Amino acid sequence: MNILIIEDEQRNANRLQNLLHEINEEIKVVSILESVAESIEWFAEHQEPELILMDVRLADGLCFEIFSACTITAPVIFTTAYDEYAIRAFKVNSVDYLLKPIDKLELAGALNKHKQLTAQKQTGEIIHNLVDIIKKPGAIYRTRFLIPIHDGYKTIKANEILYIYSEFKVSHAVLENGEIQAILFTMDELEEQLDPEVFFRANRQYLISINSISSIHNYFNGKLKVMLNGQKIETEIFISREKATLFKQWLDR
């Protein structure tokens, strides 16, 4: 069996590969990919494997961006914890998920479940249905945040946020009215909670709304320079060459 691993943490990828060989020495890992961009390039140049082991959260975004950019019909086993509503969809449709740290018996069970799948076309439809579930407006994405202030609380609507940046491991939301408000979630958590149709993870420090973009410029080595509204002086951020293609696709939907 040919298996593709998509996992951005090398230690987890190595563990998966070792467990696969312990379960079945005839399993061949065709490649280990670390990012959304690398995966999109790989699928454009290679034949689909028989099975994909895929982490949801990758170095440059969520794995569901891969399905938006590529037609994938191969069965997928997701190797992460995710929203319980989505997890039930995996279970019902016989596309499995594994919680980290990966257990050998659970991985063996997932591989056995894969053998029971009768058609790759059916699995492809399941995956696209899952993506639709995750993208369904109001299904899992935040519409507002409850923020503690002084001796009370205030709410911030997600559509009031222009962009979020991380400073000293604290996430700060820049609002349409110019206010800056600390939010008690990590950037990775916010990326999962906010609608990817509206918000894009530009880099590890910035999560930007489509409404925050003032201008976009080509930069050195295939990078992009993006100017953001929200403060008296526009904020300048950079998008890597690897993420530039995804960023353009996000803008051109």
Image (tube, helix red, strand yellow):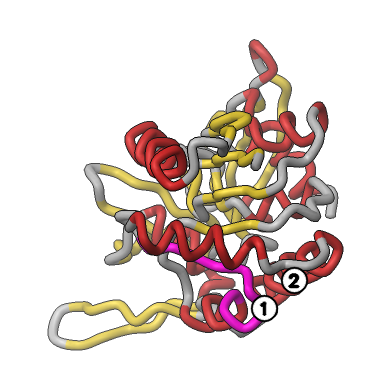
3D distance between C-alphas at marks 1 and 2: 7 Å
Q: Main secondary structure of the magenta part?
A: loop
- As drawn, is 207 to the left or to the right of 196? left
**Neighbour class for label 2 at 10 Å: few (<14), some, many (≥20)?**
many
Question: Residue at 39% of width from left, 83% of height from top?
Answer: 155
Please say if 14 is above or below 113.
above
Residue indicated by mark 2: 126
Residue 253 % position (x, y): 84, 55
Residue lying at the far bottom of the rendered structure? 152
Give the magenta-colored segment's residue range: 90-99
Residue lying at the far top of the rendered structure? 221
The local secondary structure at tag 1 comes to loop
Please say if 177 is above or below 17.
below
Quarter of image, res 196 = bottom right
- As drawn, is 64 to the left or to the right of 34? right
Quarter of image, res 5 = top right
Please say if 63 is above or below 185.
above
Residue 162 % position (x, y): 55, 58
Question: Residue at 72% of width from left, 21% of height from top?
Answer: 218
Taking the magenta stretch, the answer to whether it contains residue 106 is no
> Callout 2, which amino acid?
Ile
The local secondary structure at tag 2 comes to helix
Q: Is residue 233 visible?
A: no
- As drawn, is 112 to the left or to the right of 42? left
Residue 48 % position (x, y): 77, 41
Residue indicated by mark 1: 93
